[in-house]
Amino acid sequence: MEKIIEKIVSLCKRRGFIFQSSEIYGGFSAVYDYGPLGIELKNNISQLWWKEMTQVHENIVGIDSGILMHPKIWEASGHVGAFNDPLVDCKKCKSRYRADEFSEEYSSLNWEEVQCPKCGTTGSLTSPRQFNLMFKTHVGPLQESGTEAFLRPETAQGIYVNYQLVQGSMRMKVPFGIAQIGKAFRNEIIARNFIFRTREFEQMEMQYFVKPGADDESLDFWKERRLKFYLDQLGISHKKLRFHQHNENELAHYAKEAWDIEYDFPFGWSEIEGIHNRTDYDLSQHQEFSGKNLSYFDQKNNDRFLPYIIETSAGLNRMLLTTIADAYWEDEKNNRTVMKFHPKIAPIKAVVCPLLKKDGLPEKARQIVNLLKPHFKVTYDQQGSIGKRYYRQDEAGTPFCITIDHKSLKDNTITLRYRDTMKQERISIDQLLQHIKENI
Ligand code: ATP
């Protein structure tokens, strides 16, 4: 039986969600392009996140910092020295692995006794070598040592180095947050599981600045809020979400406490978002490396301190994969595949179909498209039998199909078909817009 993830990859290509990058050149490993439905879905998800962060929470503001930044930032953050993955090669079949795939405590493994998972040879694996994940580039025409720069491997540092400018210009008072959505790049050793781990991806990060001592309570608050986002905003199944707390081996050296939200993907439970108590590590590092005083002055209490940071860090692409994996449904009874997206994130909210390509039905259908399109994304489809059109939209995850027939011309009603139940009802065109608005 074809694996679920392969079926998902195939559906994503067939329906215009996600394509392998540079496909006509044979592909480019671990980079993906988003097609017309994929970008709608991605935008819907990121807009919900942005709204949740910067609109629902009045004390959080957004920024958009550069992908290229002063190289010293990556020394201060620890990325130059320690943003490494342990790389292991098979001398026989040339397969490549991350050593921590074999064991979290890989440094104590005797590699002579370990078997290559691909070719089965024992003793063919090299000892782990540390490999820095940052992509290097050069700024300016000369490739010499002083011109080296990095593509950011996370968006968080852009927030830390701007924190005082944001705080001052917006007169923010601790506790406050700064949110950012943007691209990040990591030269991952192994990239697999479709868009789960890629070399170019987008992050949605929010850094929350709190007074030391208020950090534990804030971490608990954000853990709860973030889980709620997946349930209420994205409509993800509760039983497929869980928290995983980092143990001592997993905990980054700067973190006091760290939790991942994990999703039960077809390839197993995996991290989709991290919620971390980063203490004052980042600001104290930037203070030391930049020589600038980055402390915050609390005027009310005449108190000066370096804030602690609670971070919520999610991958937009992983969040999108979560929504796709959760929505994928093989409806065997009706012999169809359905993407049961929450209507809020569905790429297209409704399709308008004239039953026939004649008798004035297409014109009437166009009138309905014009009525709905200022309010949400709709599409028009007159190709093929009505059953085929419905099934196409089921795979695209469109919650509503609107069909215009001869009766529509007489009494100004249409047939509304619901994606998940396939139930159909006749409703008046006058009520259509309001009805759909209430259900998305
Ligand atoms: P992992 O252990 O999976 O490599 P990480 O713990 O290094 O991830 P973070 O640095 O905490 O991840 O990044 C925060 C979020 O960014 C992750 O939860 C994930 O959603 C996303 N992310 C990180 N690396 C990638 C990647 N290579 N491709 C897609 N998303 C990623």
Image: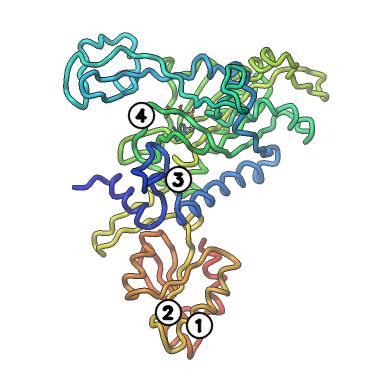
Q: What residue appears at the point 50 percent right and 83 percent down from the top-left corner?
A: 363
Identified at 47% across, 87% down, the residue is 360
* Classed neighbour count for the residue bearing mark 2: other residues with Cα under 10 Å, few (<14), some (14–19), many (≥20): many
Q: Is residue 412 above or below residue 134?
A: below
For numbered disc 1, what is the local secondary structure?
helix
Q: Is mark 3 within 8 Å of ligand 1?
A: no
Q: Which quarter of the figure has residue 73?
A: top right
Q: Which residue is mark 2?
A: 354
Compare residues 141 and 151 and report the one nearer the observer: 141
Mark 3 neighbour density, 10 Å: few (under 14) some (14–19) many (20 or more): many
How far is disc 1 from disc 4 in space, using C-alphas? 53 Å
Q: Residues within 10 Å of mark 4 (few under 14, many from 20)?
A: some
Name the N-terminal-most of marks 2 and 3: 3
Q: Is residue 281 above or below residue 262?
A: above
Please determine whether, in this image, residue 431 is positioned above or below residue 272. below
Q: Which residue is mark 3?
A: 320
Question: What is the number of the mark on residue 190?
Answer: 4
Above or below for 130 versus 215: above
For discs 1 and 4, the disc positioned in front in the rendered view:
4
- Image spot of residue 281 (x, y percent): 61, 17
Q: Residue 229, position in %: x, y?
A: 52, 43
Secondary structure beneath dot 4 equals loop
Find out whether the residues at labels 1 and 3 contact each other: C-beta distance under 8 Å.
Answer: no
Q: Residue at x 51, y 63 (%)?
A: 439
